[in-house]
Image (cartoon, coloured by chain):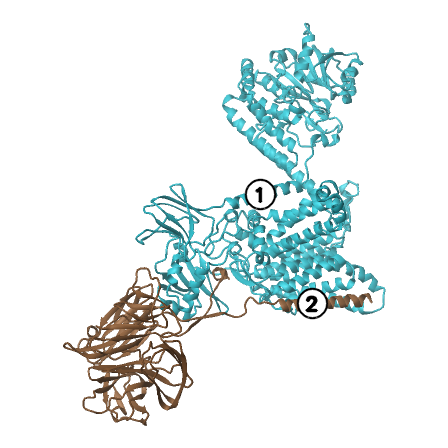
Chain colours: A brown, B cyan
Amino acid sequence: MRTLSRSTLLAIVLVIAVILGVGATQKAETGIQTVAKFPATVCPSNLGDGTSTAVLPNSKVLIRSIPTKNNKLVVAGRTNFQVGNKALFVDGNQTTSISVTRGSSGWLATATCVVSESDQWFVGGSGSLTSRAELDIVNSGLSSSVVDLFVFTSKGPLPLISKVIPANSEKSILIDSLAPGEDLVAIHAVTRSGRVSTFFLDQRKKGLRSLGADFVFDSGAPANHLEIPAILNIGKSKNAGVQTLRVLAPGAVDATIKSTIISTDGAFAPIELDNKVIKHGNVTDLTFSPVLSGSAYALVIDSDVPVVASVHTVINGEFSWANSVKPFTNVTMNLGGLTPRVLFQGKSVSVGISWIDINGKVGSALVSGSDFAGWTPKTGVRRVTFVNNSASYGAILFTGAGQISNLPVAPGAVLESAAIPQADARVISRR
Amino acid sequence: MSDNFFVTAIVVSHDGARWLGKSISAIMSQSRPVNRIIAVDNGSLDGSGKIISQQGITVLKGDRDAGFGDAINLALAHLNESKNNEELLWLLHDDVAPTKTALKYLIEGIDDKPQVAIVGPKLRGWYDRNHLLELGISIAVNGARWTGLEDGEQDQGQYEEQQEVLAVSTAAMLVRRKVFEDLGGLDPNLALFRDDVDLGWRARVAGYSVLTAPKALAFHAQASGTERRNVDVEEAFLHRPRLLDRRNAAYVLLVNVSWWLIPWVSLQLVGTAAIRAIGYLIAKLPGYAADEVAAVGILIIKPREILSARQKRKTKRLLSSRIVREYIPPRGSQIRQAWERTSQSISKWLKPNNIDEDINEPMGYADIGIIDESFDDQELATVPRISKWQTLRNRPLLAGLGLTTLVTLIASRNRFGALAGGALPIAHAGASDLFTKYGESWHVVGMGSAAPTPPWLALVGLASGVTLGNVGAFISLLFLITLPLTFFAMYRALKRLDLSVSLSVIGGLIYSMSPTIWASINEGRLGTIVISLVAPAFLGISKPTSDLASRSWRKVYQTALFAGFIAAFSSAFLTIWTIISISLISIELIQRRDEIRRLNPITFLMTTDRERLKRLLAFAVLPGLLNSPWSLSLIFHPTQILQDPGLPLAGVALNRILLLNPGGATGVPLWILSPAILLLIAVLLSGRFKLESLTAVGIFVIIIIISNLGTYGHGSSGNVWVGTLIIFLEIILIGPALKIFRELIPNLANSDLGLGHVLTGLITAISIFSVGATTFWAITTGANSLVRQGQAEVVPAFIQSLSDTSGKPKTLVIGKSGSQLIYFVSRGSDLELGDPDVAVATPPELESAVEDLISGVGINSSKVIGAYGIAYLFIKNPADQAVVRTIDGIGGFTRSSATTAGVVWRVVGSKSRVSITDATGKVSAVNANSIGAQDNISTPGNVVLAEKYDSGWKALLNGKKLDLKKSPIGLPFFQAPQAGTLNIVHDGTKRRALLSIEFITLLTVIVLSLPAGRRRREVPIEELA
């Protein structure tokens, strides 16, 4: 009996110990904790001769100009923030702010406020006599940065130009200084170090007469398949203007491209852009004049070697650059009451859209279709969120009285997720 | 009577009745009779005068407070000098008994030697008649009485020749009367003690010789010196003989040495008095300590007395005082004698406790009383030759020590040299650096810390004395000898439990080869290693007994001191120990609540028997106090209780804990079952050893509960290390388990085969297998431990060199632990021993900046990081390329280098450790030292300190205190209203005060736990003379 009771006691003790042990188990290393934050973005300064507005998510967002003396962030105080001759630093938030610049002659240029990108391809602009194009490099970091500029022209690549951008400063470089007299330009900007946001405003003038302006966006890395989702259909009338596809095969081999125009009328290959050989290293412009019933269309380019491309649309006294984009996922953009057309292209378009207007009212819609679909916000929409349910491409087309501008549906900054580092003295202990 | 001398014997008595009878008889029965005898009785209260007068001797009455010299002078005043023959005075104490021929030989010593003025006999003990007391005396420069004899030296005829000495004792001194009177007799300022040395010194410088005549023998009781009678002379302040002796010694030196030696002698007297006083305090003899100090003090306040005495001596001096130099003992002799006395005392102290003599060892003939050593030799000659293996078999202790030593030598092949790894940081510092670190109030670790340093650091510094202060060498040595030492520690502990040598050796092997010991060695668990060495002995002395109330206070203090020592290495032990002590106090109070209620609490505490309570209170308080202020910090930061010395490491699976095998990746494999768990089962099943069983189960439950708790502390995160608790569990269990085994075997041998046989066989087999397999594992894969020599440096050399510049730049080091990104601030060097133990959390503002930096959103990260004085950012290889790209792109960091060690960036705009920002925003560096700063600032502004904020920071501008403020990013700063001299310090007053309390407590407890010294009157007279 005594043995039994001792054994029972032992068993009970061990069972209790195991239960307590398991219950109390609280692993120190329960897996790596991560933190996700939106980085701050930068809107370009007013590069034109008119006004520039940064459309912010709300009036409480923190901002500062670049440069500032003490780098202190302040509350914006308004949603549509007038930007002066200094770039605007916008504290990290989950929405994408946009910059809307209007020239005194009436042109419109829009840009997304973006975070630092180390590798950008700007396909557009000119260094000719009419050009007032400029590359606006903003270093929002606290150390100086080095940006390498690889300029390509119709005659081939130019020697490398490196620019040092001091900490917390903005530097504008006229394209005609980079490629004097060159009509066709593409620039590959590589940031070697630092927090650099680069904008490219193509502005042209003939004498005192403005020929229009628009931002050239980063087309992304060269690829064999490119999608340019929102191109204004300018028709075939004599005064309508010109549309040009600018292509660059930056590699060592010539490219052969095939193009497809996708619109509400269906898809077809424009003869001007079909089976065209693009000499490598040389910027090539291909003019085309599609006949379409819709007001806009998308262009799909396939190439046997990686290329970068954009479409230049010129109408009377104004032009725009439509660049190739990547499929978007979830993007929230601040429209600030503007009513552009948002166009989606894809095999099966399905985009959920939700918005909030300036009165705080919310709304939603589902845009779907095959190949090509569009949506125009109601008046007074402050912020809109696009949720891509398919692998669609999107872009925003601003059109108005003699105004045209193009903006990709793409976030200015993506959620940065990183493992939370832990303070741990073991890192400086020998082991 | 063949000589021509007239001998007058003068006997001085003072309460000497105890010895007088024999003394007078001895004097009266000399083979060469004295010519006349007279006695002076200095106011004896014990009938001494009567005893003398009954012998027909004239007795003069002296005052009770009169000195020996006064008595002699009184006698001489009554005695006319002999006119026919030269008169010799034979000065005699009442406690001295000369042998029959003493006077004869004394006269032989002086006869035909006109230069010899004084001659003395060989003095031997009154009780131990062979004990040599004196053959002439001298005085050391520190005032010590010097006989040149060893303590307790026996007379074996080794001193039979006459020799020149500085002086002889007045106990039976023969002196020419004329010389005696010419010299002025004995100095009246030396009523007792040292008057003899003074007389001899004066005789020497007057051109006379002083001799010993060893054939003249006398037995001396040294009644005054050994405090067998009161010292009532006028100068004896409070009747303290030691005080008088020390005062007189100093007096003799100061009045006799050359004048230019007086400062040096004074210095030595004061110095040695202080040292002796400390020694007496340690020996718990405060009265003697006071005597030492007071003796010098009394003399200093009476300089006139010394000046006057020196003047008198000057008139009689014919020779330089330097002629006595040859009789003053050289310093080497004094040091040698002090050393011998100390070592004898220590061995005497240790010997009674040495109970490890093997009673089974065959005794030699000498041991049993036959002292003819040839018997032993004959026995040895007939012993058949046996092989070394057989010798080892017959001597299991030797075999165990040999085995553990061999295993540790092979297993430590990767651990010869500067060790680091696992929980153990590198130890580059010397012992003094550890002491400095222990005393500092601000530690330059990470972003700085004001955390109290754990006392183990000072103890390791102290222990590194064995490697001449080289801490790294000491750590290596400790890790190397841990195995044999733990074996021996457990062996000794088991022997104290009356287990046989063989069983003790088995227990020692089970213990030393346990997975916990190996895990501690392999993972660098310094605290557990130390505890595994000392805890077996501790459990022996702190064995809970019911007779706590009667336990001596010395034992109580010893236990508390020992507990304090262990607690220094284990905060968990300190907590458990204190909680148990407080619980026992509470139980006692609850049990006696009726008594308390009846008497009211105050009366209860004052009047009733509180011995047990007092002892428990000492147990509860002292270990904590001995470890303050570190122990106090545990109250405010209780999670630190779960921290062990060094860095925390990742935990292990619960099954390992259940099997009491806490080793991680480099631990003993789980399939080598730890014998400890079997011991636990065996003890529980036995139903005996209830206290041990209960304690073991309690510890086991605690182990399981806390083993997987994650903690942050010591600059890192990890799991609670339970190895120390498992060590205690094993120590508690091994003894009872072996006792069960010892008693079970005979029972099983006499019983039929049953479950008992099976279980016992199983446990034995598993234990043998475990020890064997662990040994094999240890010398093979076990050698690939986390702790090893030659671990590569972490911080690049150029950053190390930059850290010494005046700006004291810091470096943010980023690396990986598994897949976790980790970082810490380096002050230019790798983490060193003790650094993790004081490291505290990084300021949240800096944490946030680093977090933003890594996630790529920290646009201002470089600003914050730079403001904290971090000038470099270093990512160790293998570097996370995504992080490298992020840092390259985020701005504020300029890449400095990329080597095989990693990538280094310079933080743009980083601040100096101390900087000042003026009104225009201009930032200037302030010259900083390792902790504070001192510089002249040329402008008013904000002085920012790139350290963690702490209220201990203090700044003085032109001697005026500035207010401490906290910047928005958590940095301490001061507003300097004007230019001037700036002084920034971290105020360590509080820490110094607490350390002083700790030090005083430590000294007190050490003194109280040491064996007490005895007053001379307490020493049995047979021991003295």
Q: Label 2 belongs to which residue?
A: A16
Residue type at mark 2? Ile
| A220 w.r.t. A29: above or below | below
Could you say whether the residue bearing mark 1 is in a helix, strand or loop? Answer: helix
Name the outermost residue toward the top: B83
Q: Position of residue A30 (x, y in %)?
A: 54, 69
For the residue labelled by badge 2, is the local secondary structure a helix, a strand or a loop?
A: helix
- The answer to whether one can see residue B156 in this image is no
Quadrant of the drawing holding the N terminus of chain A: bottom right
* Label 2, label 1: how far apart the Cα atoms are: 44 Å
Give the chain letter at badge 1: B
Residue A107's place in the image compared with B295, above or below, is below
Residue B846 pos. (x, y %): 43, 60
Same chain? Circles 2 and 1: no
**Dividing the picture into quarters, in which one does residue B286 lie?**
top right
| Chain letter of disc 2 in the image | A
Residue found at the very far left of the displayed protein:
A207
Closer-to-camera residue (A308/B848)? B848
Residue B599 in sight: yes
Residue indicated by mark 1: B997
Left or right: where A100 falls relative to B961: left
